[in-house]
Image (cartoon, rainbow, N blue to C red):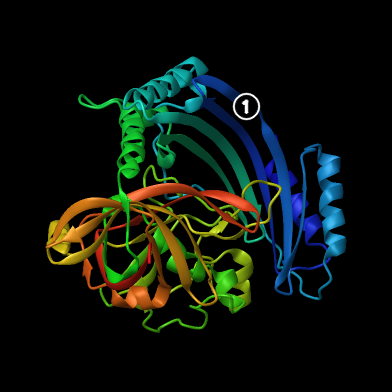
Amino acid sequence: MLTKEIFSSLLKTATSAGGDYGDIFLENMTPLVIQMEDDKIEKISTGIERGIGIRVVYDNKSAYAYTNDLIKDTLIETAYSLSRAVKTNSVHATFNLEKIRPKTDFIIKQMPNNTPIADKIKLIREANKTARALDRRIRQVSVTYSDFVQSVTIANSDGVLVDDERVQSLFAVSVIAEDSGVIQTGYESLGGFTGFELFDETPNENPVEALALKAAKRAILMLGARRIKGGRMPVVISSEAGGTMIHEAIGHGLEADLAGQGLSVYSNKLGAQVASPAVTVIDDSTLQGKRGSYRVDDEGTEAQKNCLVENGILTAYMYDKLNAIKDGVKSSGNGRRESYRSRPIPRMTNTFLAPGKADPGEVLRATHDGLFVRKMGGGQVNTVTGDFVFDVQEGYLIKDGQITEPVKGATLCGNGPEVLKSIDMIGSDIGFAIGTCGKDSQGVPVSDALPTLRIPDIVVGGEV
């Protein structure tokens, strides 16, 4: 066990040659992954990942070192080697570490590492059986269960010493259906900052069976769907669709490293109108049970609710310590890293477009014709220009304000600021989706969400 005195000694050694800021990230993680393919358990992977990362920020850049050897002499040598990489005249003030208790807390009812692996395999088999039983055209079902308990201790030269325990559980079902050479897929997942209580059954529903059935039904539905004819049209995006659009179209562009380097269409836009007055965008790592939540970020800054866009006006970027020092502001608590091997960078947590006042059904009824998106797929965005392309996993034509036939092959193509400025109806509902966000070769758990909303005119890709 590393004491407060050892953390203090490591920080003093690491910053002995100067520096504006220093921190230490100690991690102990026990991950578990179970995968089923072709009716067989193909993989059970578990273990212990333990190590420490030490960083010094100086002259708007950073030096970083890590090791999984936690012997005191090795740690001191690592910190000393790091200090030799620091070339600066700045010297951080004397500091004293004080243990803090985060204001944000989460309740875990059933720790996943206390649940037998046999119980987790049982869930996988139930989901696999349910998906395969739906239709003879189901050709392949893949089911993945994963969890981890990550215990961290973070110390920094602001005098903070804090512990956190992050608990994540995840369940995902992927289904492939085929008929006469036509292949379609369905995918669903659930998870978050939660224990095995994620899988508690309600009186009317087994959550993993419901998830498998939903994925399988989507794959079968899309087999019979015709390809959409491309063109410009109104689009209604359901709250069921997940917040992929908000995550990609604006979220990444509001991360302070990209914005600060001029690699975002939202660079130097604080105080400017970047969206419709109806649009408010929030990033909130304090939400109970959500996949992107935590008590403190990976630099020891407390979790926060950050309003990024308020009534269409850009009000804030998402900051880690390094970029906050560059801009002379405080960190927003968005400094995140994949593990002790990675230096922290600005990342989203739980990012969403806030609900409006319209009845969700009215958003649809007010749209004479167009495309209704029930489920978004993957997407990509050029953060410099704001141009994006998103796949539609499940979509339907709208006729006379009603959902009609399913269509496939649809993509949404547009420009983030232009689309956000054009949104003219926002529903009072909201729906979250989960994922693992990749950036700079690091993946971190996130969630995103949208209410039901209408884009009155956007390019929908499809058949010409």
Q: Position of residue 357 (x, y in %)?
A: 17, 64
Label 1, secondary structure: give it.
strand
Q: Position of residue 236 (x, y in %)?
A: 25, 62
* Badge 1: residue crowd in 10 Å (few <14, some 14–19, many ≥20): some
Q: Residue at x 51, y 23 (%)?
A: 38
Q: Is residue 258 left or right of residue 60?
A: left
Q: Is residue 238 left or right of residue 194?
A: left
- In the image, residue 306 sits, relative to residue 50, either above or below, namely below
Q: Which residue is mark 1?
A: 46
**Quarter of image, res 452:** bottom left
Q: Position of residue 170 (x, y in %)?
A: 46, 36
Q: Position of residue 205 (x, y in %)?
A: 25, 27
Is residue 325 at all visible to an observer of this figure?
yes
Nearer-the-camera pick, 13 or 272? 272
The amino acid beneath tag 1 is Thr
Nearer-the-camera pick, 63 or 237? 237
Q: Quadrant of the C terminus?
A: bottom left
Number of marks drawn: 1
Q: Quadrant of the N terminus?
A: top right
**Quarter of image, res 313:** bottom left
Instruction: List the single residue furthest toward the front.
Output: 180
Q: Residue at x 71, y 68 (%)?
A: 93
Is residue 328 at all visible to an observer of this figure?
no
**Quarter of image, res 203:** top left
- In the image, residue 205 sits, relative to residue 63, either above or below, namely above
Nearer-the-camera pick, 159 or 312? 312
Q: Is residue 225 left or right of residue 368?
A: right
Nearer-the-camera pick, 340 or 244? 244
